[in-house]
Structure formats: structure tokens, C-alpha cells
Amino acid sequence: MTVATAEPYVLFELAGTAYAVPSAAVQRMEMVEQVTPVPNAPAFVDGVVFSRGQVVPAMSLRGRFGFPRRGYDAATRLIVVAHGARTVGLIVDSAREFVTIPADAVHPPPEGMAGTSGKYLGGVATVGGRVVLILNVAEVLGHTNAH
């Protein structure tokens, strides 16, 4: 008999939907301060931010996922994630919760989500009665270079 492990996640909101990113990929979370635009950046990259002595690209997840843009407000958060040698700040509508999700509660994304947006998802879970979409950090950070 195997015991399912549980992984910690940071929950965040984006366009009225709950998402989760594995805590292991998160370096820090902070309010969105000054974002400096960068020439020729992809449309979903708002610019760069200076965060704890490091210049970090700031990616709008609304832009990345094709949702309508909106201005930053007091709830807007920058979730700085790392994958391999890349560090990127994900701009989300709000982020406040940390949860532990049992591995056996995470299911593959539904068949109909296998398109462009589906590749950004590592799974789907139910947390406290709400559906939470779990990010595949490697896919979200892929192809973000400004070429």
C-alpha cells in the first residue's frame, strides 16, 4: 500500500478562476511596484521589475492566457517563479493562500483543454469545494524570450 504525498501550492486568482503553482517553484510573492516596459518584448511581457536586487521579466498571466487585460490594483501580485535557470515574475489578479493538495486529488486536465491553453496546465484539483487549475511552470515560462 502506498501513501499519497501532498504538495504545497500557492493559490492565486486570475480572471475569476483559482489557479495553483507549486510552492517549490515560487521564490517570493510581492506587490506589483514599478514595471519598466522593454522594447520588442512579447505582448504578454509587461516589462521588467527590480525585485530584491534582481531584474526579473514581468509576465502578465492575463496576457499569456489570452484574457482581457486590466490595470494593477492593491490586490495585484507578482509571483516570482523559477524553473531551471529562468526566473520570471507572474503578474496575477490576487494571491494570498497557501494550500497543501494531496497528489491523488490532482487529475490530468480534461480532454477538451488539450489546446493552447491546456498545455499551461499540469492538472486540475478540487480544493475546499472549488476547482483549481494547476500551472505547468515549465510551459508557462517557455517561449518568453523577446525575439
Image (spheres, helix red, strand yellow):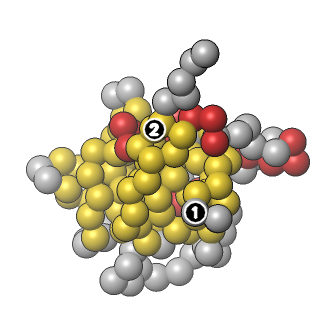
Is residue 112 in sight in this rendering? yes
Badge 1, how many Cα within 10 Å: few under 14, some, many 20+? few
- Secondary structure of the residue carrying tag 1 is loop
Location of residue 111 by image quarter: top right
Residue 30 screen position, x and y as percent = 26, 64
Where residue 60 is drawn, which disc sits there? none
Residue kind at label 2, given as amino acid type: Glu
The residue mark sitting in front, 2 or 1, is: 1
Q: Is residue 91 left or right of residue 112?
A: left
- Circle number at residue 128: 1
Q: Amino acid at mark 1?
A: Gly
Marked residue nearer the N-terminal end (2 or 1)? 2
Place residue 22 in its image quadrant: top left
Q: Is residue 61 left or right of residue 53?
A: right
Residue at the image point whose x is 51% and y is 45% from the top: 101
Residue tagged 2: 7
Residue 129 on image: x %, y %: 64, 65
140 or 97: nearer the viewer? 97
Q: Position of residue 108 (x, y in %)?
A: 73, 38
| Residue 104 in the image: above or below residue 31 | above
For residue 120, side relative to residue 29 (left or right) = right
Could you tell me which residue is drawn at 20 percent across and 56 percent down?
A: 51
Q: CA distance from mark 2 to mark 1?
A: 16 Å
